[in-house]
């Protein structure tokens, strides 16, 4: 039997190149060899969008189209919507007794996201909700609800997976061997820098190129990308390793990369010309993705059916698992 993979994405916006290289490429490699469950985590999306549910609802469909457009096959990947599987919520409640508040507050991923919220909204900004603090518990429920054995993650998500593993160990220690302890599957590219040189490309940072960006939007974004600050004049030599334009030439595997590098170092290439070449290459890279996406944009009922069929299949597996968990906890009345 194939091992089970569980991964999920919060529908808070369209996918960008960081998602594609940090996760999407890995999904494409894994979809042929595993029993693959891909969750559109709308409930977790509400943890920091609780006052804007329409955004989460809209992006549930948008992010599914993005995932299909990169080449994920619904015949191989079981797409489902988190809120349509109430067993996940049940497990979240059960697991909440196994984790202390102080442990959640020490989780490096949670700490990082809280710090980012404070930076964006200030100390007087949005307070941290119970739901936001507890989403690692919800993620543990996601994984174990489907007996997930492998979880594709970036290195920044490893603390969340470790929290899940702790919950599994504690549950099994108290109630007997019931749950499987998941293992990570790390992406080759774990993090993609933003156009501004930030170590992480992010929706909230405004430094991302999205898979749905049109040519004019890509042009505007790339023309504003950070280059070597020491290069003042067009024919000044520069260091490509500190230039975000060169970084993206490498990222999308520009076949002209050696020329880009050597000309940059010799001062034989101006930044504007280099950016224009990158714009063309990014548009070429995104063209087949956009063509696949148009099929689903023109036929939205296909997306509805994929999510509906996948959620029905996921619920069957979840019901089996919750029955096993309740029996172990002696609440299978």
Image (tube, rainbow, N blue to C red):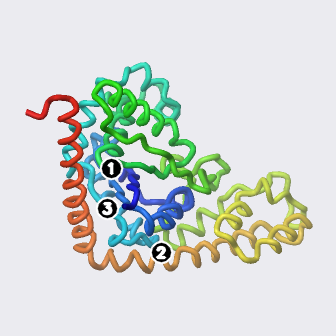
What residue is shown with label 2?
Answer: 289
- Rendering coords of residue 97 (x, y %): 29, 23
Screen quadrant of the N terminus:
bottom left
Residue positioned 52% across, 51% down in the render = 185
Disc 3 and disc 2 in contact, CB within 8 angstroms: no
- Rendering coords of residue 191 (x, y %): 60, 51
Res. 80 in view: yes
Res. 113 in view: no
| Residue 197 as seen in the image, left or right of residue 286 | right
Badge 2 crowding class, 10 Å Cα cut-off, few under 14, some 14 to 19, many 20 or more, is: some
Which mark is drawn over residue 41? 1
What residue is shown with label 3?
Answer: 79
Residue positioned 33% across, 70% down in the render = 74
Q: How far, Cα to Cα, is label 3 from label 1?
A: 11 Å
Disc 3 and disc 1 in contact, CB within 8 angstroms: no
- Residue 258 or residue 270, whichever sits in front: 258
Labels 1 and 2: the sequence-earlier one: 1
């Amino acid at each position: 039997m194939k091992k089970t993979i569980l991964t999920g994405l919060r529908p808070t916006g369209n996918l960008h190149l960081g998602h594609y290289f940090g996760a999407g490429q890995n999904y494409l490699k894994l979809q042929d060899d595993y029993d693959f469950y891909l969750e559109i985590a709308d409930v977790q999306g509400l943890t920091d969008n609780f006052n804007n549910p329409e955004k989460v609802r809209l992006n549930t469909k948008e992010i599914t189209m993005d995932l299909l457009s990169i080449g994920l096959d619904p015949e191989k990947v079981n797409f489902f919507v988190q809120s349509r599987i109430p067993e996940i919520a049940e497990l979240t409640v059960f697991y909440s007794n196994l984790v202390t508040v102080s442990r959640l507050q020490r989780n490096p991923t949670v700490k990082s996201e809280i710090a980012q919220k404070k930076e964006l909204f200030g100390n007087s900004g949005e307070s941290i909700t119970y739901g936001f603090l507890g989403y690692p518990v919800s993620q543990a429920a996601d994984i174990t609800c489907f007996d997930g054995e492998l979880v594709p993650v970036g290195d920044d998500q490893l603390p969340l997976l470790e929290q899940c593993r702790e919950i599994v160990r504690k549950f099994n220690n108290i109630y007997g061997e019931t749950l499987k302890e998941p293992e990570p599957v790390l992406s080759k590219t774990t993090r993609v820098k933003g156009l501004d040189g930030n170590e992480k490309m992010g929706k909230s940072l405004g430094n991302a190129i999205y898979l749905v960006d049109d040519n004019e939007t890509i042009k505007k974004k790339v023309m504003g990308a950070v280059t070597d600050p020491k290069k003042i004049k067009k024919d000044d030599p520069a260091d490509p390793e500190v230039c975000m334009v060169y970084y993206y030439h490498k990222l999308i595997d520009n076949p002209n990369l050696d020329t880009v590098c050597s000309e940059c170092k010799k001062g034989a290439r101006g930044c504007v010309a280099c950016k224009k070449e990158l714009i063309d290459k990014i548009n070429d890279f995104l063209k087949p993705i956009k063509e696949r996406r148009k099929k689903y944009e023109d036929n939205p009922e296909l997306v509805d059916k994929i999510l509906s069929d996948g959620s029905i299949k996921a619920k069957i597996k979840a019901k089996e698992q919750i029955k096993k968990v309740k029996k172990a906890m002696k609440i299978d009345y």
